[in-house]
Each structure stands twice: as C-alpha cells, then as structure tokens.
Amino acid sequence: MAEAHQAVAFQFTVTPDGVDFRLSREALKHVYLSGINSWKKRLIRIKNGILRGVYPGSPTSWLVVIMATVGSSFCNVDVSLGLVSCIQRCLPQGCGPYQTPQTRALLSMAIFSTGVWVTGIFFFRQTLKLLLCYHGWMFEMHGKTSNLTRIWAYLESVRPLLDDEEYYRMELLAKEFQDKTAPRLQKYLVLKSWWASNYVSDWWEEYIYLRGRSPLMVNSNYYVMDLVLVKNTDVQAARLGNIIHAMIMYRRKLDREEIKPVMALGIVPMCSYQMERMFNTTRIPGKDTDVLQHLSDSRHVAVYHKGRFFKLWLYEGARLLKPQDLEMQFQRILDDPSPPQPGEEKLAALTAGGRVEWAQARQAFFSSGKNKAALEAIERAAFFVALDEESYCYDPEDEASLSLYGKALLHGNCYNRWFDKSFTLISFKNGQLGLNAEHAWADAPIIGHLWEFVLGTDSFHLGYTETGHCLGKPNPALAPPTRLQWDIPKQCQAVIESSYQVAKALADDVELYCFQFLPFGKGLIKKCRTSPDAFVQIALQLAHFRDRGKFCLTYEASMTRMFREGRTETVRSCTSESTAFVQAMMEGSHTKADLRDLFQKAAKKHQNMYRLAMTGAGIDRHLFCLYLVSKYLGVSSPFLAEVLSEPWRLSTSQIPQSQIHMFDPEQHPNHLGAGGGFGPVADDGYGVSYMIAGENTIFFHISSKFSSSETNAQRFGNHIRKALLDIADLFQVPKAYS
C-alpha cells in the first residue's frame, strides 16, 4: 500500500552491535523528487508574486528605463533635470562600492530610474483602476444609481406583485427607512468598503451558505452534466483516467497562475478569486456555523465504490500519474471484491442530512483513532470521486433519460456523494460523468470553467485507443489504492441511518424535469433583436402566469465579478414591463405589432437591470448588508425585515458556456454539455436552470416538490416550451418544428 511503500524509506533495528539503519533508495528518491516539485511550485508562486506586484511594469521595462537614463547621460542630456546629481551628493562618502565617481554616477542613475519606473507603475495602476471602474460601456444611456435610489428600485420591482393598499404600506415603510434608519446603517457599510476588499462577499458566504443548518443536498449543492450528444468511450475507468489527469493539469495551471481571466463581453477581465478554493477544499460542519477548510495542496483523491472508501494517490514521487496509470488504479478499485465495513456503506449520508447532527456525530465518533485518520483522508483529498454501478445518459429518443440523469447527479442514492467536498466527480458504469458541487466556496461559472477545460482536453488532446482505453501502457508496479479503515459503533450507525432517512425523504420529494428545446436557439432569438437571456426570462414569466395564474417574485443570478472578490447579484425579472406583456398575451385581443412593442420594452428593461446588477447597482445585496448591520446594531427595521423574508417562488439561473475556446463549435456542433441544475428554493416554487447551447438549442432543468399541490415541473416545462414558441411567432421567426 502507498503509505507502507513510503514508510520503508527509513527503517532501523536494534542489534547487539548497535543500531542498524536501512534506507530505501527508491523511496528516498520519490521523497526527494516530491520536495523538488514542492519547491518548484513555491518558486513559481514567488516569481508570479513579484511580477504581480510590479504590474503593469516588468523587469524588462525597468532595465529599459535604466538604459535610457544611462544612454542620455552619455549623450550629455540630463533627463533627470538635476535629480541624479542630487542623489549622487546624498550617497555616503568613503570607501566601499561608492569610491569611484563612475560607480556613484551609475548608482544614482539606477536609483533615479527605479523611482521613475515605480512612479510610472503607480500612475498606470491608478489609470487602469479608473478605467475598470467605468461601466458606462455596458449602457447606451445610463446614469449612476445612488444607494437611496436602490430602495425605490426595490419598490418598482414589487409593484406588479402588490395591490394598491399593500404597495402604499410598503411605500411608507420604505420612506421611513430612507429618512431614519438607512443613513446610519449606510455609514457602516461605507466604512467596511474602505477596509475590506468587498463589502458583500464575506457576509454572503457566511450567512447565506455556511450558517445554513438544513441539508446541503438539494437545498444548496447543484449538479453539472457531461457532454450529452457525443461519447468518447464506454470504459468507466478509462474515462476517469483522462478526466482526472486533465483536472490535475488544470490545478497545476491554477497554482502557477497561468489561467487567463474570463473577460466580460470580451472587454473587461473578471475577478478569478473564487478559483483559489476549487481544489483541496472541504466544508467542515459546525453546530452554529460551518467553515471552509482549504489546503495549499493535496496529492490524492478519495474514492467511493460499492459502499467502500479508498485513497488513490495522484502522484508517483513528483510525477503526476498518466491517464493510463489512473485508469489502471480505478480498475483495481472496480475489481476489488472486499465488502464494506460495518457502518461504512451509508457513511456519506451524514453529509446529506442536517448540519447540526453531522457536527455532533463528527465530534463524538470521528475525533480520534482510525475514524479520524480515514475522515481526514477524505476531507484533505483534492476532490471526491464516486464510482456508480448504474448507467445514465441522454437518449434524445427517450425524454425521461435526461431527467433521470439529472436526479442521479443532484442527490444519487443519498449516501454515494460526499456533499461537503468542493465537488464530487460522479462516474457511471457506461463512462458518462457529472459533477455535484458545494456552493459556499464559489458559484457555478467557476466550476463550469474547470469542466469546459476538462471536457475539451479529454476530447481533443488526450484521446483513447480504438477499444476505448487510455493511450499508453500503465506501470503495473504502482502500489494499489488504499482502503480506508473505519470503526463505526452502533450509536454512530443509528445517527447515519437517521441522516439517511432525512436525506431520502428530501430526495424523494424532488421532481426534476430536464429537456432539450430543439425548435431554435440563440441564433434565431437574435433575429428578434433582443438578448437571448431576456427572451428566455420573459418567456418564463409568461409560462409561470399560465401555470399558476399569477405573478411571483423572480430571482435571476447575475455575476458581479467585475469587482474584486465579487460573486452574484439578483436581477428581479418580474417587472411592470414584463407583466404588461404577459397580460396582453393572455388577453388575446392585441395585434402582433402591439405585442412586439410590449415585448421589446420588457426586454430592454430586463437588459438594463442585468447590466445594473453586473456593475454593482443592484438592489438585493446592498439591502442584505444593511439588514446585517441593523442586526449587529440591534436596530429594528420593518422595511428590511419584510424585504428579506419574501420567498423567491421562481428562482432562475443561466448557465454560461464557451468561457474557454478550446475548439470551434461550428466544426464540432455536437460537443455540447447540457448544463446543470439545482433544487427548488421555495417549497411551493420552481427552480429553473437553462443553457442556451449554441445557435440551435436550449437545455432546461426544472425542479419542484411533489409535496406541493401547486407545482408540477413537467407541466411548467410544457408551458415554457409553448411560451418560447408563442413569442417567436410574434416575430414570425421560422421554427424547426411541424
């Protein structure tokens, strides 16, 4: 086993003649190479730190400035306007390196040049900061939104949902809040904005995610699907070999800071801070709040198969295992006939149940001995891998196949995913893959960036043999993966079973309906002269009204990563303009020209709100922070209490794609992922995730709860289909359907 293999590097025995030391050269070689690899990473980080510290300058630009100063001096031109002479006079007299006039002159010019270089860097940075703070390029006509204006923007967002009496009451609460409470609370937020790199993100992570005591499964974690229209191999272990090798290649690029930032609309770089905790990260349960544990490195993954946990090393010494070696290691796990230990099979159900119960069990049963060592092997892993015995994939001829695939990724059987890990890589028996990701450490576009790189590398760079195996011959001398050892008492097994029952009830209550919308995609939507996202969001409003007979508070996530450490802001998609369009559609008496005009007004309003959210002028995160400050100060605010208690009965999110351009989608139109999804936010609401996948198709993932008599995911999906087609018909857009 791997640990034993390393342990024999240094052994000793006591004999009558003294102590006899025995060293294993091979093992010491691996230890040495591992150390070299570690120091290489440190040196790369130091180099990157230096380059980052002088950006946009560089060592080369520093030398150029020095050479220009020295060259001008030889030409009897004093570009320093006498400063070099002043510096020379200030240098200490006497022996040493300053004894010759030539040396003193060169040193003075070097000091002057360095000062000019540093000053230039400072002004360039300030200019760049001002340029990046300018967001007017996103708007044709837009003025700066003040903090107090956001309160009235909130009132505008809820106007379609309230009758006149309710709106008047809310207006009075808002006016009272603006005049009396808000100025005091705002001062604290301004102070925090001066002190912290982001005035929202740390509180958002703690109070929205880490302090939540309900199960992560379904309620917080989300899933991501594989490529669904092409298949590279049916061999489960081979697919894992390529994919995990590609993931560690990505992690290496991340450690070396070689990943280019994603550009907003191809113009402005977005913050990459969230990527730092992608690997080697676990959410540790606590009684009151959880914490995120992030390690600088991890050299293994934790694997679950048929109720057993394994530790699989990713490196041999300093060398990353090749895909064929990883395939061999996973095949060894798949072929291992050993049964689960008592209590081991459903152990991961602890991460699927309530957080308090898991925290108490962790402290009581996993704080010492072999249980602690085994748990640390999981929590300190780069990520978690689940080897499933079932087969799932998308069959276009069987619509239910995509929904079953999504359900397997969202919750599995409630004990074959480690929901606390930053992400779980899920492998099905037929080679199909997917991810289940924890939400606290980052948002979906971050894991999407990794997934695009991994799938592209797998398909276009690594490849497979004709029989579906990884290229190359494996090294059979590698030590096999290690079984983790547990000693789980009956009391702990009872807690595990209790958590499992909680998780199973939650999973059984989730209705998930996933489908591919084939009539058109963003190509034809753009012919309507509107953004694809606005088109889909307005269609969702129409579909929801047809489904429920009323409007509801609607959440759409927008990225705020143009700001340092930014995460998300809410776009309130149910607007007065969108409701006017929906009502006109329902009346059936308006001309197509009138309906098109109403639609364009709603679309423009939605686009403007999305841009406001991206540029920090949204409503909800600001009100959320004001609410927290009021709690810290013990100040009561009926307005904030009501704002923060409103349920989001329609929670939506668009899944980004093509963040990395690893291939030409026109040449490979079938290399499409189906996106991913999440559970419903409200018990009587819908969760809708969609991916506008290329020019000709859209994938939808709709979730609701069977326990609600008001919702039905498939019914809502059918309404979405009809709404999209009805809106397209207003523009007489040709549709690929009969």
Image (cartoon, grey):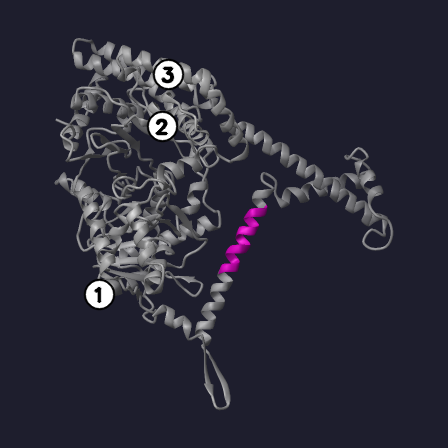
Q: What is the distance, in whole Å, between disc 1 and disc 2 at their CAs? A: 48 Å
Q: Position of residue 435 (x, y in %)?
A: 29, 46
Instruction: Tell me if label 1 and label 3 are in contact, CB under 8 Å.
Output: no
Quarter of image, res 698: top left
What residue sits right under mark 2 in the picture? 570
Of marks 1 and 2, which one's residue comes earlier in the chain? Answer: 1
What residue sits right under mark 1 in the picture? 335
Q: Which corner quadrant holds the N terminus?
A: bottom left
Q: Which corner quadrant holds the C terminus?
A: top left
Q: Which residues are magenta?
A: 38-50
What residue sits right under mark 3 in the picture? 173
Quarter of image, res 210: top left
Considering the numbered disc 2 on the image, is that residue within a helix, a strand or a loop? strand
Q: Amino acid at mark 1?
A: Asp
Q: What is the distance, in whole Å, between disc 1 and disc 3 at their CAs? A: 66 Å
Q: Is residue 125 left or right of residue 254?
A: right
Q: Position of residue 174 (x, y in %)?
A: 39, 16
Position of 372 relative to 111 (above/below): below
Residue at the extreme right of the image, as rendered: 94
Considering the numbered disc 3 on the image, is that residue within a helix, a strand or a loop? helix
Of marks 3 and 2, which one's residue comes earlier in the chain? Answer: 3
